[in-house]
Image (cartoon, rainbow, N blue to C red):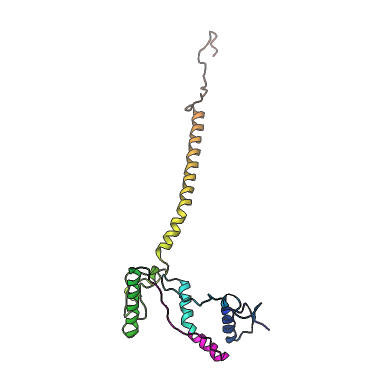
Amino acid sequence: MVDVAVMGAGVMGLCCGFALARRGAEVLVVEVARPGAGASGGLVGALVPHAPLPWSEVKEAQLEALIYAESFWADVRAVSGVDPGYARVGRLEPLSDETTRARAELLAEAAARIKANPERYIDYIYGKDEVGGTSVLYLSDVPFEDLGFRMDLPKEPLPKYTGQVMSNLPALVVGLAVALGTTTIATRRSANGNGNKNGNGHGQASVPVTNTEKNEGGQS
């Protein structure tokens, strides 16, 4: 009995099937052509490593996958007897400007200090990911929470949130203008209507007249 059916025998489909099978699941991989016949077999197919900045949950998942990749492909080689050709060969990432380059050098220096002195520093660079990365980085030998640093800051850059607010402003302004205009018109109409009823408008109000003169017979 099949527990999981995986559609497509590309890199992702085969990796998912292999991981599930290693965990004891009965897996069926369905492919309409042959393994790797789709995007995985294309001339420009690649396993793209994550770009570290700015940080996000997606980037974190990519980093975890990269860290796990070495043991995963070693397992594939051990089970199949076929070398998948995986190797950590590094990569080059162009830096767009001097500010980006300077920050990258600071990050490299901070990481090197932590690696060289694991007993001196905790394994965390504060400011690396907080709010998309700050211009000042901190190393510490005690938890940053004990120093009063906030650890619940978002990973996304703050301009992302301000951009969302600014994108909604035009609709908000138009809505307020329509509401104020409608209120003004309704108020003026109400005032004009009350004026007409009370004789304060353009119309004339009827004033009751009582005849208080008496006739010769004493009858009013």
Q: Is residue 103 left or right of residue 89?
A: left
* Range shown magenta: 70-94
In this rendering, the answer to whether 135 lies above or below 18 is above
Percent of width and height locating residue 212: 50, 15
**Pick the front one: 125 or 142:** 125
Q: In the displayed structure, does residue 18 sit left or right of residue 90?
A: right
**Front position in the image: 95 or 212:** 95
Quadrant of the image occupied by residue 128: bottom left
The image quadrant that residue 159 belongs to is bottom left
Residue 15, relative to residue 202: is it above or below? below
Where 187 falls versus 129 (above or below)? above
Quadrant location of the C terminus? top right
Point 41% across, 76% down: residue: 92
Is residue 108 shown left or right of residue 61? left
For the point 49% across and 87% down, which residue is it? 71
In this view, the residue farthest toward the top is 216
Q: Residue at x 31, y 84 (%)?
A: 120
Q: Quadrant of the N terminus?
A: bottom right
In this view of the protein, which residue sits in the foreground, 18 or 127?
18
